Amino acid sequence: MSIRLQVVMDETEVGEYRRLARRDGLTLSEWVRQKLRRAERNEASGSVDRKLAAIRAAARHDFPTADIDRMLREIESGYRG
């Protein structure tokens, strides 16, 4: 189901948005929908403090590692047998 969204704005703004939409080969409506979807994707999710706490917790771990070539050889040998 589609819902109509009405946004009141200055004629100058609408004209600029129409120009940008035409430049991209889109209707103004499609251009606005795409910009809103992009804005939603770019919106930060979760608090900065929570994200930093997760990074700090992960950085406290000390996992064994190896040379990348050695790791790849070991992985490959696991596939073979």
Image (spheres, rainbow, N blue to C red):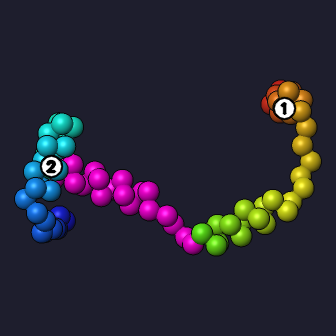
Q: Position of residue 18 (x, y in %)?
A: 12, 47
Q: Position of residue 48 (x, y in %)?
A: 60, 69
Please tell me whether the stretch drawn in magenta is mainly helix, strand or loop. Answer: helix
Mark 2 → mark 1, Cα distance in angstroms: 52 Å
Q: Which span is picked out in magenta?
A: 29-47
Q: Is residue 66 left or right of residue 50?
A: right
Q: Give the quarter of the figure containing the C terminus.
A: top right
Instruction: State yes or no: residue 58 in magenta.
Output: no
Q: Give the quarter of the figure containing the N terminus.
A: bottom left
Q: Amino acid at mark 1?
A: Ile
Dot 2 crowding, Cα within 10 Å, few <14, some 14–19, many 20+: few
Instruction: State yes or no: residue 45 in magenta.
Output: yes
Residue labelled with disc 1: 68
Q: Residue at x 38, y 60 (%)?
A: 40
Q: Amino acid at mark 2?
A: Glu
Q: Position of residue 52 (x, y in %)?
A: 68, 66
Asked whether 16 or 55 is in front, the reply is 16
